[in-house]
Each structure stands twice: as C-alpha cells, then as structure tokens.
Amino acid sequence: MAPNHSKSAAVSRETLQLKVAMQVMLTARRWKSWVAEKFRDAGHTGAPTLVLYYLVDQPKGLTLSELSSRMELSGASLTRLVQRLEKDGMVSRRRMVGDGRSWLIVMEPAGRAEMEAFEVHAAAMRERVFEGVSEDDMAAALRVLDAVAAKLAAGPDAPARP
C-alpha cells in the first residue's frame, strides 16, 4: 500500500519527518536495486557504477582520497571497487605527478564506453520515473535532500545550514 502524502491530511511535523525518512530509505533501496540489475550484465553493481559516474567528468582522474571523500566510502572499500574496475579494464591507477605516494584513478575508454551504454538506459529510466514531476518539485526535493545530507554528514547537533 502506498503511503498517503496528501497535504489535506493534518499531520504533525514529527510524523512528516518519519514519513520522509522512511520514504527516502525505501526509494534509495529501490533505486539501488534498479541500478544493480541494469549493470549486472557487465558484472557490476551500484557501487562500481557510482565510481564511474564520479570519474566520467574528471579527465585527469581523482585520487583515491578525493574519490573516497566524494563517495563517503572508506579507503579499503573503495580500493576493492577500484581494483574490480581496473581488472575489467574500466579504470586505471596512475602515479600522481609530483607525489609518488599518491595514485590517480582514471577512467579508461572501456569504462567510458560502458558508462555511455549504461547512461542510455539510466536516462530513459529517470525520464520515466520523473514523468509528471515538475522541475520546481525536483529542485525543492534536491534542496531538502542536500540539507538532510549535510546535516547527517555534520552530525545531528550541528547548526542548520542557511
């Protein structure tokens, strides 16, 4: 049964917070399952896909530390994902010029081709999912999710973001 999100039902702020939190968790789980299913043919799940999304617009690559920070994953977890993608020829690790201790993670042509093929399906899916949702509503949802994500990252006692 779908939850009732109508404005006409008078609900407390506490109830709305609970409903939003639960809906975010359910939606994230459904989205992650869809991504995993779409990329399964290539032998990947959502996490490696996310690595590729972060790298696609970074022609010089990102350090493991930068990638770890953006994805909010431990270095060890991310290292395993990168090794898997490297084994499949989608990314490579290259010594960083000027700092021989650091490695840049760079998307390879095979990774770019995989992302382009995947993105055709992902874009079509997003179009279907967001059908009937206005740009204003998407922008409002993004503002709410950004605020909640920032609060969760900073800790529950951090001051609210302006």
Image: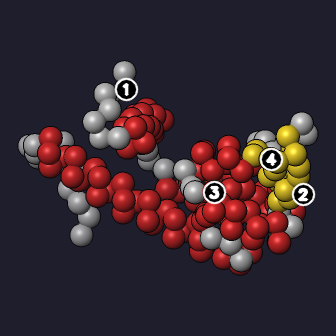
Judged by depth in the image, the label closer to the viewer, 1 or 4, is: 4
Q: Residues within 10 Å of mark 4 (few under 14, many from 20)?
A: some
**Mark 3 or mark 1, which has the lower sequence index?**
3
How far, Cα to Cα, is label 1 from label 4?
33 Å
Residue holding disc 2: 109
Element type where label 4 sits in the image = strand
Q: Is residue 114 left or right of residue 67?
A: right
Q: Residue 43: horizontal and vertical position, in percent?
A: 71, 77
How far, Cα to Cα, is label 3 from label 4?
13 Å
Residue holding disc 3: 75
Of residue 22 and residue 78, the one placed in the foreground of this image is: 78
Q: Is residue 52 left or right of residue 92?
A: left
**Mark 1 or mark 4, which has the lower sequence index?**
4
The amino acid marked with disc number 3 is: Gly
Of residue 64 and residue 54, the one placed in the foreground of this image is: 64
Give the quarter of the image for residue 152: top left
How far, Cα to Cα, is label 2 from label 1?
40 Å
Which residue of the protein is positioned furthest toward the top in this rendering?
A: 162
Q: Is residue 145 left or right of residue 84?
A: left
Q: Residue 41: horizontal and vertical position, in percent?
A: 71, 78
Element type where label 3 sits in the image = helix
Residue holding disc 4: 102
Of residue 2 and residue 45, the one placed in the foreground of this image is: 45
**Mark 2 or mark 1, which has the lower sequence index?**
2
Query: Residue at image x 90%, y 57%?
Result: 109
